[in-house]
Image: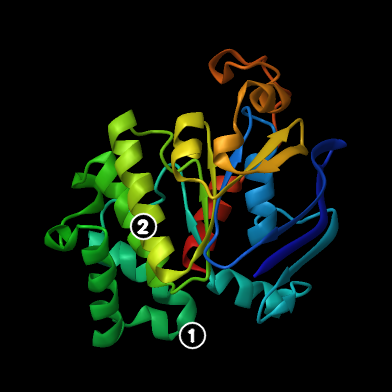
Amino acid sequence: MLELDRISVTYPGGVEALKPASLSIGEGEFVVLLGPSGAGKSTLLRAINGLVTATEGRIVVDGIGEVADAKTLREHRRKSAMVFQQHQLIGRLSALQNTLTGRLSYHSAWRTMLPLPRAEKEHALACLERVGLLDMALRRADQLSGGQQQRVGIARALAQDPTLMLADEPVASLDPETSRRVLGLLHRICRADGIAVIVSLHQVELAREFADRVIGISAGRVVFDGAGEALDETVLRQIYGTADPDHAPAPKPDAPPANDAAGSEATAIA
């Protein structure tokens, strides 16, 4: 349902964050991106959703075709939900109101200034129920725990009725047990709905547990593409330069745009 044809990204100053990569993602596939910090995982996710403009290559989406102009990018983003590491919730708003922002792209700009229809609220409540937070629907987002906030982020993404979900290190700020629960929830829901997922992780054990497929990235290049159970010492050395990812050599950092957080926020409700 998604095809990347030799996508590459070079930032100003000549930093080649992502070397030409060609990948096909199937419907309902749960794909994990693994690699050291700065390897290009976030750049790849941002390029897929247009937060970063690919320097070269094509993105082709089932039902849309090539994402080549503002119209097709808007259609692609509407069906490509994002889950962020730092939640990107509006703290003063309730869990329900934050979830409803996932519906804004289905309405005109002037319509979003008014209360959304009852049917939209019912849809948002159903999404909160799926992540186990229906009883927290009216609580302010900044009064929720980190794991609960991330579940609201998943509910907001589900409210878009996506066919593709992109998650950029969604459990990096959570403790190991909460990380497993949140990732397991995302895996179950997307499996049930046939939503394709591309999630970047640092935890190799979670990749082995949940991934249908692992894509390893090192220094901006795809160096591995295979099943999670194939993550042995040889493969980990390909990806990290060592069999122990916790002691991988420091890579050259990505160079994301300075206004990335603002762009992420905008995309979440675009």
Q: Which residue is mark 2?
A: 188
- Residue 47 vs 168, above or below: the answer is below
Q: From the image, which quarter does the N terminus lie in? A: bottom right
Residue drawn at point x = 67 percent, y = 58 percent: 48
Is residue 81 left or right of 186 when viewed as pictured? right
> Which kind of residue does numbered mark 2 sit on?
Arg
Residue drawn at point x = 50 percent, y = 57 percent: 82
Q: Mark 1: which secondary structure? A: loop
Q: 217 or 73: nearer the eye?
A: 217
Residue drawn at point x = 88 percent, y = 37 percent: 14
Residue 256 percent across, percent down from the top left: 67, 40
**Of label 2 and label 1, which has the lower sequence position?**
1
Residue 142 percent across, percent down from the top left: 24, 46
Q: Mark 2: which secondary structure? A: helix
Q: Where on the picture, by quarter, is residue 224?
A: top right
Q: Which residue is mark 1?
A: 108
Residue 31 percent across, percent down from the top left: 57, 50
Is residue 237 left or right of 172 when viewed as pictured? right
Residue 165 percent across, percent down from the top left: 51, 60
Report if residue 102 is visible in the image: no
> Which kind of residue does numbered mark 1 sit on?
Ser
Q: 54 or 240: nearer the eye?
A: 240
Residue drawn at point x = 33 percent, y = 30 percent: 176
Rounded to the nearest angstrom, the CA distance separating label 2 from label 1 is 32 Å
Neighbour class for label 1 at 10 Å: few (<14), some, many (≥20)? few
